[in-house]
Image (spheres, coloured by chain):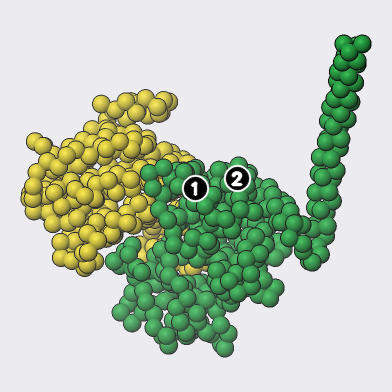
Amino acid sequence: MNQTSKKQGISLKPGSIVDGKWHHNRYYIIKQLGRGAIGSVYLCESNGKKAALKISDKGSSVTMEVNVLKTFQKVQGKPLGPSLLDVDDWIDSLGNRYSFYIMEYLKGKEVSTFIKQHGEEWLGILVIQLLEDLGRLHREGWVFGDLKTDNLIVTYPPARLKWIDVGGTTQIGRSIKEYTEFFDRGYWGMGSRRAEPSYDLFALAMVMIHYYHPIQFTRGKVPKKTLMTKLQATPQLKKYHQCIRNALLGQYNSSEQMRDDLSAMMMKQNDQVRSHQSNTSKIKNPQIKRKDHQSQNKKKEIVHPVFESLGICAVVILFYVFYLILI
Amino acid sequence: MKKGTLKQILLITDGCSNKGEDPSAVAALAAQQGIIVNVIGVLEDNQREDSAGLQEVEEIAMSGEGVSQIVYQKALSQTVQTVTKQAMTQTLQGVVNQELMQILGPNQSLEELPPEQRGEVMEVVEDLGETCDLEVLVLVDTSASMHNKLPTVQEALVDLSVSMNARIGRNRFAIFSFPGKRKDINKVSDWAPKLDSLSSIFPKLSSGGVTPTGPALKEAMYQFGKKSLRRSFMREDEPNIEETGN
């Protein structure tokens, strides 16, 4: 539904051709993939290759997104986000100017579809993966900003959660460029809209909640209470409860903290339910857990003997007193 | 470099002005004075987006060199801040464009640059947008037909303040409503760096049927002048004093 604006610029039909003004590349529109606050994204084809095309009549916004994508390209290691293939302008037959850019087309499934097909245990795992990427992004000095279910897809195999729209990506310390109310801590009155790692972590926690509440609820009179009550009332999230809570309350300063917490919680879960997957980090944790048990037992042992001996003494003294009285 | 202050009027209305001068003309005058006029048209839930009364929304914003959007109540919060930010970028881009023209010749605007070079220019625009000072006078139509929308408007304004205060630059907000009891506009809250009082700030609706958008805009324009006199004395050292206003 398009409720925000009347002049939501452009709508391209399948089969249309977008001609680059500067680089003279031709793109054949195949279908629309999505539509955001600025512009629309289409699947297109050029020289037999499929790619994603984002086009908007707001040239400045397109340029800003391109700037972000360009920064991502410079980051070492696995790419953060889709790679940028072309940037150009297109003048349509009526003489209107649109700016567009072409990026790599990531084929994947919606998060909810994927989890429904592959099992709920994936939710935590995908989130942990994303936390790794977010950590790298934050270390580069950026915050993703508009983190929401719609901006994530799962590519597989191997299954991996990826973000697809960088429109909200903001330098740390500035004001968040673009956000979506339900996932925005400002909306819930639980923090500022200044770009800092904890902003993304709040949104990610909301993504987890959103999976079990696909119909977004509103904040009500006391937003924080509404949110916490919803969290409590979602039994499927019980195992992540503490972690989600911390993220919502802004208690994680880095995504590593949240990742470590979340994986510890999932290990515990797997321990109890029995897991056949083996993984180096998973081996580490049961040991920690066992240690926990041992130390608890020790404590019990320390407490018990004292009580025990005291009890025995008391009984003996009692008997002795009776013995004295009786004699 | 001394950063400038951007001045904006944000008009929130449901259209249908019916008294006094043409609001578009006043908006053009404001733009001349360096005050951008943004307009948000609020629809009834059952109203169509292209209804006639709302046509002037776009016209006013166009002559005021600002941004306009027509929305349902539900989307108001997000729209208010998008419109404000967009207008800021637009203004700053205009300024940068003028500089470009001076350097590169009359036909060189940002769009005429190849995409590769545009990026750097936009970075400058973005920097300015983050760090410049901003003054927004919110002018709210409180005529009878708007009445049931006022709580949402209020929420949206608090939200705007949350958004803008995440910036590095300083902000000032003032809220006026129209029509006023005796004057064209009615002061709801004076210039302040934040809007955070959630108590009901809009007065009971004052009159039926009359929507003097033009005169209200004009009066709003003068509010900038009054304040900047006062500001120029205190500006440099102690920004907090400004809160007291008059």
Identify residue type, mark 1: Thr
Label 2: element kind: helix
Q: Disc 1 vs disc 2: Cβ atoms closer than 8 Å?
A: no
Q: Which chain is green?
A: A
- Residue B111 location, x and y as percent? 41, 66
Residue A208 lies, with reference to residue A2, above or below; the image says: above
Quarter of the image with the N terminus of chain A in it: bottom left
**Residue at 12% in and 54% down:** B17
Residue A137 position (above or below residue A32): above
Q: Identify which residue, B91 or A214, lies in the foreground.
A: A214
Residue located at (12% from left, 45% from top): B215
Kindly tell me whether residue A287 is visible in this rendering: yes
At 70% from the left and 65% from the top, the residue drawn is: A78
Q: Colour of chain B?
A: yellow
Quadrant of the image occupied by residue B224: top left
Q: Chain of mark 1?
A: A
Q: Is residue B18 left or right of residue B221?
A: left
Query: Which quadrant of the structure image shows residue B5?
Result: top left
Quarter of the image with the C terminus of chain A is top right
Q: Which mark is residue A246?
A: 2
Spatial distance from mark 1 to mark 2, Cα to Cα? Answer: 15 Å
Q: Which one is in front, B199 or A238?
A: A238
Determine which of the numbered discs, if any, sits on residue A229 in the image: 1
Q: Helix, strand, or loop for circle 1?
A: helix
